[in-house]
Image (cartoon, coloured by chain):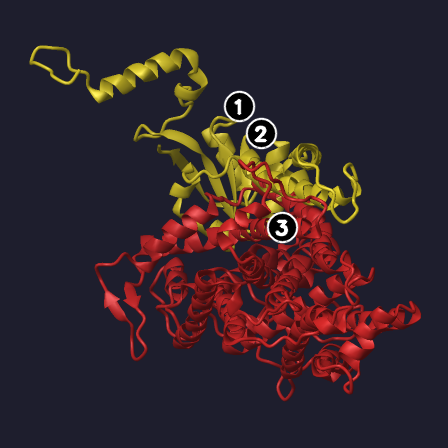
Amino acid sequence: MTTTKKGEIEMDIKDMINDAKSLGADYFPMFLRKPAPKFVTESGNAVFGIIAEFDETPKVFKAAKQVRDAGYSKWDVHTPFPIHDMESAMGIKTTKLPLMAAGAALTGVTIAISLQWGIDWLYPVVVQGKPAGAWQAFMPVIFELGVLITAFMCIFGMLALNGLPRFHHPLFSHERFTRVSNDRFFIAIEANDPNFDPIKTKKLLEDAGGTDIALVEDVS
Amino acid sequence: MSDMHPDQTIALQASGIASGQPVARRVPLIPGTHDDGTLVEDPSLRAPLVLGERSFDEVTNIVCGYAEAPIPKIWLTAFTITSTIAALGTGMILYLIITGVGVWGLNNQVDWAWDITNFVFWIGIGHAGTLISAILCLLKQNWRTAVNRAAEAMTIFAVICAGIFPGIHVGRVWMAWFLAPVPNSNGIWPNFRSPLLWDVFAVSTYATVSLLFWYMGMIPDVATLRDRASLRLHKGVSRVFKLPMPLGDGLALHFMPKPDQIRVLIYGIMALGWRFSSRHWHRYEKAYLMLAGISTPLVLSVHSIVSFDFATSVIPGWHTTIFPPYFVAGAVFGGFAMVLWLLIPLRMFLPNFSDILTLRHLENMAKIILLTGTMVGFAYSMEFFIAWYGANEFEFAAFANNRVNPAKAPYWWAYWTMITCNVVFPQVFWFRRMRQNPLVIWIVASAVTVGMWFERFVIIVTSIHRAFLPGEWHMFFPTWVDILTFVGSCGIFLTLFLLFLKFLPVFALAELKLVMPQSHTDDHH
């Protein structure tokens, strides 16, 4: 419709988006409807969680064990470098990345085999006395493509499992958190953890030796 | 600055506003000696990897401080020179593409000369980075943390330089896509049984995997630069944008965004929102270990496949089974020489870096030079011995009459330069004093770099300049385009390396912190 008179129904772009959203919400609720926040600050923002700061590796390592033993599941330790054996202190299950990489390696090898045999069949060339069907000369490309696809899986699979790239995160609004990339260690317990309780969780982190304990808002 | 918040002091220091070095050296060198305390020979003692009892914060400041400080004059001078040379090289490449490969000194007999020499030279240099990051990672050699980032960067830049030459030597560059198996209307496909095609796959895989490996290692460190820039912006201590000037202070441009704003944007995008989560670190370390695992055979395969270009042909002097291990040893040799050649001046110009890059690191690399140099020397003598023992007169002539004998071989000087630089020079490293002296190491590294270029020249040109029929014999003379293209590729390499030095974290920060004593989880360290 190019011409619109006054009085006709004018579609506002905002209305269209809202209509699409409500239609989508019926079919894809997991994408569009967030559950109501369990905890809200005085300003009305949802609570992301509680964060505590530590200044030494042994302290944060001990504290992580305490948080794990208290039964929390949605929490994380943020450290400037990968601390040795932190996964057992936190009770993290081993990642499935090696399995995915093995799958990628098989994919790469399969691609290389079908590429070379396919082309050998489409365009048979006999040079240097190597007959059609001589497969030995195909090994270098099989190896290289296997390595290439595995490397892709290692890096992009790692990023995907980590949910990265994600440029916004509630923790970035906590100013002291910028020092995690320098020399400070943080434990953050999320509010949607079933065990989360603003007072008890704070107490736990205090007892574990955390300093500068703060509530982080989920402003989005 | 005593009334300031500690964060603000750090931010000031970090932004280069505070005067002097980013962090002053706390423990000076042991007076009267060149020893920095890392050269202990007692095997029960572990040499410290970071000197001066640095804290995490100081190490962060040292590494990030240089990337954040205003552009130094010496950097600007070096960059002007190298980028001019790089532009010259680019001009030569354009001239070649416009005119044709006839501008090089190639002839009917010598159809591979400086182009392939340069390719093998650069790709060989590109082997040290992945060797340090992959093989030394699997061998748990913690000292690699001080050199791996710079070596990996050097690898990428060397592979870029290497990639130029096969790309342009094909003549009609616009047909270079024929290298890849792309469906086309002619129904013509590449020959998968040719080592030249294996090369395409090996080099492109190596370039991609090295780049990804380098980038992945850099994600946490770039996130550190992002956080520091954002901290300075919040504290209001960011510098204004200054256009660097040859003399005096830079020209302040207030309408431009502040450098920290640009940093937050670019480093922010590069860091992919990394938030140093232990759950992420767990997968990151797994991915790193697996990449090291697959890169180890990869780095060995690449130069093996490059050597197949020669070894699978029937040219006397090329057709030998020793080539793959010989080429790999030579690549590691030349690569480590280049790493040392670049890092020793860096230690001099940026004194704080010598707390991270200690004499022990240099000594370790000198030992690798000695080991691989001896392997290369063994390969030279074995090659010659088999040429005689094999009783193939053409094979023997390729060595005795074309390379070694000054009375008969026109290229004897190239062969003996190679032997002197690659076999004789590294022998000084048998002496402790020599391999602990940065100047001696630097001189040997320069010699090895020259020698490794001559090695490829000897292998390629002396083998083909005299074929089976004496009527076909022909010498090779480089033209000015040949020479300037090679010089230009050195300019491209150094320009990229200078950009890396100024704008990216030169040391792997997170890994350095991991090898410091404060990273241990038990109290009694």
Chain coloured red here: B
Mark 3 Cα-neighbour bin, 10 Å: few <14, some 14–19, many ≥20: some
Secondary structure beneath dot 2 equals: loop
Residue B284 image point, x, y percent: 60, 44
Q: Relative to residue B253, is residue A119 depicted above or below?
A: above
The image quarter containing residue A72 is: top right
| Furthest-bottom residue in this view | B32
Secondary structure beneath dot 3 equals: helix
The amino acid sitting under disc 3 is Val
Which residue is disc 1 drawn over? A194
Labels 3 and 1 within one chain = no
The amino acid sitting under disc 2 is Ser
The amino acid sitting under disc 1 is Pro
Quadrant in which the N terminus of chain A is drawn: top left
Mark 2 Cα-neighbour bin, 10 Å: few <14, some 14–19, many ≥20: some
Label 1 resides on the chain identified as A
Residue B118 at least partly seen: yes
Does the CB distance between marks 2 and 1 fall below 8 Å? yes
Residue A49 image point, x, y percent: 45, 33
Which residue is disc 3 drawn over? B200
- Answer with mark 2 or mark 1, whichever residue precedes in sequence: 2
**Colour given to chain A in the rendered image:** yellow
- Distance from the alpha carbon under mark 2 to that under mark 1: 8 Å
Query: What residue lies at 35% left-to-right and 68% top-to-bottom?
Result: B17
Residue A94 image point, x, y percent: 68, 35
Depth check: give the residue in front, B429 or B252: B429
Residue B268 image point, x, y percent: 41, 48
Quadrant in which the C terminus of chain A is drawn: top left
**Horizontal relation, residue B306 to residue B97: left or right:** right
Query: What residue lies at 62% left-to-right and 40% top-to-bottom?
Result: B189
